[in-house]
Amino acid sequence: MLELRDIDKAFDQERVVRAVSLEIPPGEIMALLGPSGSGKTTLLRIIAGLETADQGRLLLDGQDLTEIPVHERGFGMVFQDYALFPHKNVADNVAFGLRMLGWERGRIEARVEEMLTLVGMAGFQERPIHELSGGEQQRVALARALAPSPRLLLLDEPLGALDRALRERLMGELRSILKQADEMSERAQGITSVYVTHDQAEAFAVADRVAVIRRGAIEQIDVPAELYRRPRTPFVARFIGMENLFAGEIADRERPTVHTPLGELQVAADGAPGKRGERVVVLVRPDAGRLLGEDEEGINVVSGRVEAVSFRGRYQQTTVSVGEDVTLQLEFEPAQVMPAVGVSIRMALAPAGVVLLDSAPSAL
Amino acid sequence: MTADGRTAVLRLVQRLLYLGPLLFLTAFFFYPLANILRLSITADALVRLVTRSYYADVLWFTIWQAAVSTALTLALGMPAAYLFAHYVFPGKSLLRALTTVPFVMPTVVVATAFRALLGPTGPVNDLLRVLLDRERAPLQLEQTLTIILMAHVFYNVTIVVRLVGGFWANVNPRVSEAARMLGASPLRTFWTVTLPLLRPPLIAASLLIYLFTFTSFGVILLLGGPVFSTLETEIYRQYVTYLRPDVAAVLSLLQIVFTFMLMSLYARLQRRSSVALDFRPQQANVRRPQGLREKAVVGALIAGLFFFLLTPMLALVLRSISGDDGLTLAFYRALATVRRGSVTYIPPLLAVRNSIGYGLLTVLVAGFLGLISARLLTRPGRWRRWLDPVFMLPLGASAVTLGFGYVVTYDTLRTSPLLVLIAHTLVAFPFVVRSILPVLQGIKPSLREAATVMGASPTRVWREVDLPIVGRALLVAAVFAFTVSIGEFGATSFIVRPNSGFLTLPIAIARNLGRPGELFFGQALALSTILMAVSAAGFLAIERFRFADVGEF
């Protein structure tokens, strides 16, 4: 179990990590998700021991790590630019950590082969680093970090330097490699991973749980599906691509409804609202909308005007204006035939897609 | 004349212009060197060289003093390189400029500065006398190996800072972090990762320093006195003092062989070390020192460097303006006075005037030849490949050998200032080419094509596109030529006859250092201070005009 307690860090009087507390159980993959400059990489480097925290404690299985130098922590790390040793070949890169452990040659060779097979790079032992493609380098870096069976694996934007298609492909593969390595680990506790990324799709695909970081502090920790279903703050909602946020007021607790600039809306049943009249932030998820026919009835019916439509294949990105100064960004299914720009439409917003955030409207 | 005729004439003129640098090199570099070889093959000289162990001792001393100097320079330069590559601190650019100043200082200035600092009446000995309560100077460093080595380190430390430090700053710091994460201790990380990565600049720096200290002339002659002899000083002494040109010639041959071996090794390694490593922009790697320990170490390094670089120069300036009773300009005033009763005495101030004159003329001649050569090298063609190293050859030839070659070849010219100018031009020539060439090569062909498409003739393209862009590089080259000329000592010391009216500043300084008496030493201090000021001003100008780091070494 990795525990972070009230970690604080400032560079030149600017606090980049603020009172971060976090617990990661053994074997879990935890993603630190946040925009660039949010302090997530600094936090990772503090865990690695490459930076020292100004305040707070870092514990692994109850052991305080503060005084332990980097090279005695027994962690693995995959750097954003891989940081492979340019003067060594693939095998020597992967063997480096094992040599530091004082393993004998035969055992090292066997382990190197095992690791290269795990990442799909068997037979690449003798290759010089500069002959590898970005994706291959990424795999070698992963094999190198995993070879000594680290107690903790730290990954800093490991797919960040790759092109989009390759990234998509490696996302899922990475998760299965990490889980497999966890089973192959020579330690009883297994491999715990901390994964830093600014890409929500990557975090969702790889991690067991996701911690969203904003300005050095944790904004929300949840499993990916829950984070998507119920973002708790406007920042989290926007960061995972949801822009329809409105100030509202609770109208009824029993049949949960809120007053919003879109009118009175029924909200998701599990989102138990507070007192009547309480001011809240309402999120309308982009996939909540469905077009209504001329006389069709529905729940949460809203009328508006189509401002822009962009066909994206799996959905149609549509901007709808409601009244004078309210706009909604909605994604309609491709099966629905979208009216032309300028045409008035009626639509229903599914209550499951209307979510109350924990924040007060002042957070908007 | 028809248009075709005009182009033909233009092309002929252009061809003739291109021949200029080649003719110049042939007449004033290859021919004199060949002449030395012709001279050296006398049986007597060869027999002397083989039978007398003295010459083997000279060669051996030359080899090992250069090795020790190189090792010491690396040992002292590495922490400095680390400092510049990893930390930002107030006064960094000043300190960086300061490390380079000794490198551009003429050898006579460095020698004089070290004697001013560490000589029997220097500030270090004054201080020690008071502390230890002694009558005699406690530190007797003049004419010792110690002071020679110190001067060599002082001179060359900037090579380590520039080459290794520059490379180090660009090495991805994540690579050594990765080693730390994989369980390597800081020391082990340094040996297994950092050092192998730094190998190309380390080898390059070592070879350069070795080459420079192997051919060191002024420092050995002026600080070592008659006690120490390297190949360079021995060539000089054999010719000037013992009047044995044949022995000097054999030694020169030896010198040429050695330096060219080192040069070709350097060139080969430089080509090989240009393998693309994992580079990232420099900004990401430097940071402020953090924590008490790091701050203390960095602070101590900075203070040590400042002290090491500044004290010799400060001692020089201070002692040049201090007399028995406080500050005085007496030494400077004495420079201009003509002494009665001495017909042969030449007032040292004349040397200042001469040096500036030589400097300006060198700028013109070397600038002209260098520009033509750089243009020639940027033209497509197959001879470019071997022409480039040919143009760089004078860089490797020792100045003393060059001067020796001149006096045996063009003895009749020694009564005119022409030979000095030619020698300075030849020494400055490679620097000029190296300053202009990268900028010229950096001009995108599309710029010239654009001008041509819009109707500019080749000459017009050169005037409208190349020249304006190369302008700044030309300025750098000019300052380079001037600084090289004003500090040149080895070749000039051969060419200029004693008490000649054409003597230069370094010659005047060396002459004064060789004479007994406080006034002569004081004049040497004053002259050195003037020379230092001029060189430093030239260097600052280069730093200001240079495009990034193009054209270094």
Image (cartoon, coloured by chain):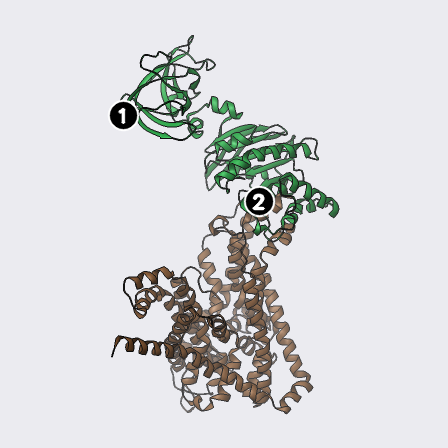
Residue B169, compared with residue B362, is above or below; it is above
- Amino acid, disc 1: Gly
Q: Visible in this render: residue B526?
A: no
Q: Position of residue B540 (x, y in %)?
A: 40, 65
Q: Which chain is brown?
A: B
The chain containing the residue under callout 2 comes to A
Q: Position of residue B128 (x, y in %)?
A: 57, 67
Q: Position of residue B43 (x, y in %)?
A: 64, 91
Chain A: its colour in the image is: green
The numbered dot on residue A136 is 2
For the residues bearing labels 2 and 1, Cβ distance under 8 angstroms: no
- Labels 2, 1: front one: 1
The chain containing the residue under callout 1 comes to A
Residue occupied by mark 1:
A342
Specify few, some or many for label 2: CA neighbours under 10 Å numbering under 14, 14-19, or 20 or more.
some
If the image is split into quadrants, where does the C terminus of chain A sit? top left
Specify few, some or many for label 1: CA neighbours under 10 Å numbering under 14, 14-19, or 20 or more.
few
**SS at mark 2 in the image:** helix
Residue B250, compared with residue A328, is above or below; it is below
CA–CA distance in space, label 2 to label 1: 50 Å
If the image is split into quadrants, where does the N terminus of chain A sit? top right
**SS at mark 1 in the image:** loop
Q: Nearer the viewer, residue A290 or A71?
A: A290
> Going by the picture, which residue comes out furthest to the left?
B1
Residue B453 quadrant: bottom left
The numbered dot on residue B58 is none
Q: Position of residue A234 (x, y in %)?
A: 41, 25
Q: Are the residues flagged by discs 2 and 1 from a single subunit?
A: yes
Residue A185 quadrant: top right
